[in-house]
Amino acid sequence: MKLRLAPYFIRQAIQNVRKNWLVHIVGVSTMVISFLIFGAFLLLFYNVDSWIHGWGDSFSMSVYLKDGIDGTAREKVLALIRNIPGAHIERTITKKQAFLDLKRALGREASVLDGLPRNPLPASIEVVFRSSKGNKPDPGKLRKELETFAGVGEVQYSEEWLRRFEGLMRVFRLAGLIIGGLLGLGVLFIVTNTIKLTIYSRQEEIEIMKLVGATDWFVKTPFLLEGSIQGVVSGFLSILILYSGYVILSVKKADILGLALLDFVFIPHSYTLTIFVVSVALGLLGSFIALGRFFRL
């Protein structure tokens, strides 16, 4: 394609869009919705994945004490925890406080606890570890060591369920690939049919151009630009709407036991660039597929 013909091709592509504006609006709207669905999934996945990896370096531990533990044994457990590098005793919870916390969490349903003959909840010590990666204690070894102490009933730490969560994230990754693939096929179908409609509307004009000696690429280029324009507009609008929704509905940073539970951030620039590039690429590919029925490439 000669560069001097570029203004002509761009004008033709814009004219095609203007003549078939309703079809293009429907096509762009559907593409935007598709990329918004995928973008929202990507935004949620990125934040949850970052949150899990952040907790991998800063975890919490609950040390549950046996009923009837004496003060001496309790102090020994507290002293051991204080001597662990990076360990911070966040809170000590008595049996009574644990029962009150449970009633507060149940709210209106707290009356179901009134019939209990005794308080079944143990006292506990909530510990937070803020160790660096190079100075991080082995939670499994630490758990075994604490559970050997007299008066300690059970020890639970956050990495146990984080490992399970990581398995769930692998399932989400696979689901994301499947969803992205299906949405991509849907976008291709939309772009292909949109370009087909514009080709049908100009079929007589195309035949005349071919009769006077126009090459296939001379006729095809405006339609390829048309698909690219659809992809550019869809990609830009989907990213803009996704970011606007993030700004309006973003969750504020929450803390549990002094740890950052969720600091909701927008997806990185590389992700937004990927969404935009994929949108343009699908628009261009859809045009190629539509043109393949009318021209021999």
Image: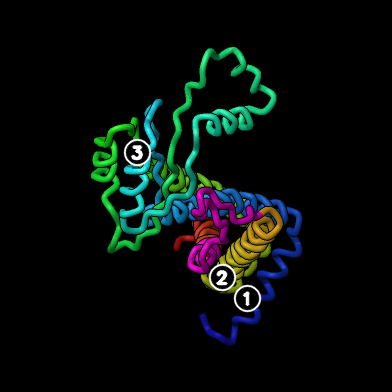
- Which disc is residue 139 wearing? none
**Whether label 1 touches label 2, CB < 8 Å:** yes
Mark 3: few/some/many CA within 10 Å (<14, 14-19, 20+): few
Residue 143: x and y in percent read: 29, 41
Residue at point 47%, 53% (across, down): 51
Q: CA distance from mark 2 to mark 3?
A: 85 Å
Instruction: Say whether disc 1 or disc 3 marks the residue closer to the N-terminus.
Output: 1
The residue under label 1 is 9
Tell me: residue 4, above or below residue 263.
below
Query: Helix, strand, or loop for circle 1?
Result: helix
Relative image position of residue 148 (x, y in whole percent): 24, 35
In primary-sequence order, the first of circles 1 and 2 is 1
Please tell me in which quadrant of the rendered image residue 263 appears: bottom right
**For residue 128, side relative to residue 117 (left or right):** left
Which residue corresponds to mark 3? 72
The amino acid at mark 3 is: Thr
Q: Magenta part of the protein: which range?
A: 250-276
Pick the front one: 194 or 115: 115
Q: Nearer the viewer, residue 197 or 218?
A: 197
Q: Nearer the viewer, residue 119 or 34?
A: 119
Q: Is residue 206 visible?
A: no
Name the residue at 33% across, 32% down.
151
Mark 1 and mark 2: Cα distance apart in space: 7 Å
Horizontal side of residue 256 vs 171, given as left or right: right
Q: Amino acid at mark 1?
A: Phe
Residue 110 lies in what quarter of the image? Answer: top right
Q: Amino acid at mark 2?
A: Thr
Question: What residue is pinned by disc 2?
Answer: 221
